[in-house]
Image (tube, rainbow, N blue to C red):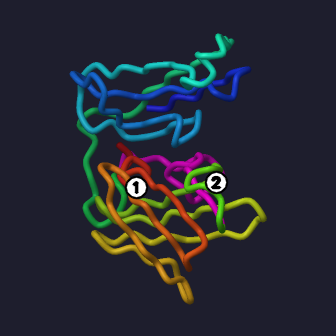
Amino acid sequence: MTVPLKSDNTANYFNVLPSGSKDVAVFNGSTGGNDWNGTLAADGEYTIRVYLMRSAARRTETANYALTVGITGSASAPVNHGAAPVGDAKVKGTPYHATGKVPCSMGYSAPGSSQCEFGVIRGTPGNAEVHVTPRGGFKRVLTFVGANVSAGEGGKVKAARSGDDWLIEVNDYERYRILDGVMNGG
């Protein structure tokens, strides 16, 4: 499923909720950006909840937006257990299975105070390479293998789970929040 949201208000986001869920989302726009592409974990009705951040709503802001939903593929697509799911298409012109933004911060800024561009190359469930580009142009590659996270040569990593998120710190300076949905497509 692909869901891009175009809005004239930067505090306008959407969440994607699986069938039967009232509050647990497979995608959270305020942390993942306004362009989602993922593999649906199961058949059923999914809810796309469009909202303004609380601070914008308190200021009685409004948003004009266009939301487009696309679903392709087959509900019974086979899975290749040696690599990413067969139905996990790549973003055209890239090696990535998905792209978007993740919360990040550098130095002494507040955790998650910025959004960093990312691209993910998925492997078997729980294994992925997340290429993150913070402001300034350098690229950090975070490699997830099961419960382990590494950041290449010279990258001292502290990684912790918080719900469906990975909280990653590299070299006591870079901080990233990576959702399970980024790595697993759901």
Q: Is residue 177 above or below residue 159?
A: above
Magenta stretch in the rendered image? 86-106
Determine whether the residue tagged by mark 2 lies in a helix, strand or loop: strand
Considering only order in the chain, which callout, 1 or 2, is on the residue closer to the N terminus?
A: 2
The image quarter in which residue 61 lies: top right
The image quarter in which residue 109 lies: bottom right
Q: Label 1: few (<14), some or many (≥20) within 10 Å?
A: many
Which image quarter is the N terminus in?
A: top left
The image quarter in which residue 134 lies: bottom right
x and y percentages locating residue 52 in the rendered image: 57, 21
Q: Nearer the viewer, residue 51 or 6?
A: 51
Please tell me which residue is depicted at 33% across the width and 52% down the height of the picture: 85
Q: Is residue 179 above or below residue 41?
A: below
x and y percentages locating residue 60 in the rendered image: 65, 10
Please tell me which residue is depicted at 45% across the width and 36% down the height of the picture: 28
Q: Is residue 127 above or below residue 32?
A: below
Identify residue for label 1: 183
Q: Tell me if 75 is positioned left or right of 99 in this view.
A: left
Q: Tell me if 135 is positioned left or right of 96 in this view.
A: right
Type of the residue with mark 1 = Met
Please tell me which residue is depicted at 35% across the width and 37% down the height of the picture: 26
Identify residue for label 2: 116
- Mark pair 2, 1: CA separation: 16 Å
